[in-house]
Image (cartoon, rainbow, N blue to C red):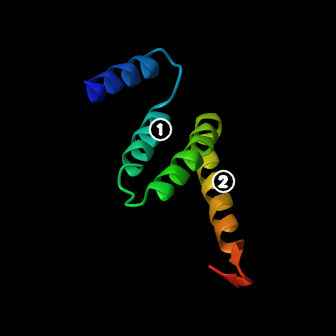
Amino acid sequence: MGIVGGIVIGQAAVEAGLTSNILIIVVAMSALASFTTPDYLMGTTIRIVRFPLILLSGFFGLVGLMFGLCFLVIHLVRLTSMGRPF
């Protein structure tokens, strides 16, 4: 029932011009990806990071999504633990 409701609401939002097809795809992919993590804390982190990426892709499209992913990768590369990089 949740899948059918998501399809109906997504289709109605696209037809009304509230969102784009790309945004619906990004939201669906991020929702599916949140169920594939084996660790609870990692799943929670992915859910927290997902919302800014959805907002960036909603406002700026694919450019916003790429900017957000690049920012995330740069942040992850700069992280260190006890003076050593991850």
**Which comes before the other along the chain, label 2 or label 1?**
1
Q: Residues within 10 Å of mark 1 (few under 14, many from 20)?
A: some
Against 59, is 62 above or below? below
Return the residue found at the far right: 83
Mark 2 lies on a secondary structure that is helix
Return the residue found at the far bottom: 84
Q: Position of residue 9 (x, y in %)?
A: 39, 20
Against 40, is 18 above or below? above
Q: Residue at x 64, y 39 (%)?
A: 60
Q: CA distance from mark 2 to mark 1?
A: 16 Å
Residue at numbered disc 2:
67
Q: Are circles 2 and 1 on residues that touch, CB within 8 Å?
A: no
Q: Residue at x 40, y 39 (%)?
A: 28
From the image, which quarter does the C terminus lie in?
Answer: bottom right
Residue at numbered disc 1:
22
Q: Residues within 10 Å of mark 2 (few under 14, many from 20)?
A: some
Q: Residue at x 66, y 73 (%)?
A: 77
Q: Amino acid at mark 2?
A: Phe
Against 76, is 52 above or below? above
Q: Position of residue 50 (x, y in %)?
A: 55, 46
From the image, which quarter does the N terminus lie in?
Answer: top left
In front of the other: 8 or 75: 75
Name the side, left or right, on which 42 lies relative to 81. left
Q: Amino acid at mark 1?
A: Ile
Q: Position of residue 20 (x, y in %)?
A: 50, 30
Q: Residue at x 58, y 41 (%)?
A: 51
Q: Which mark is residue 12?
A: none
Mark 1 lies on a secondary structure that is helix
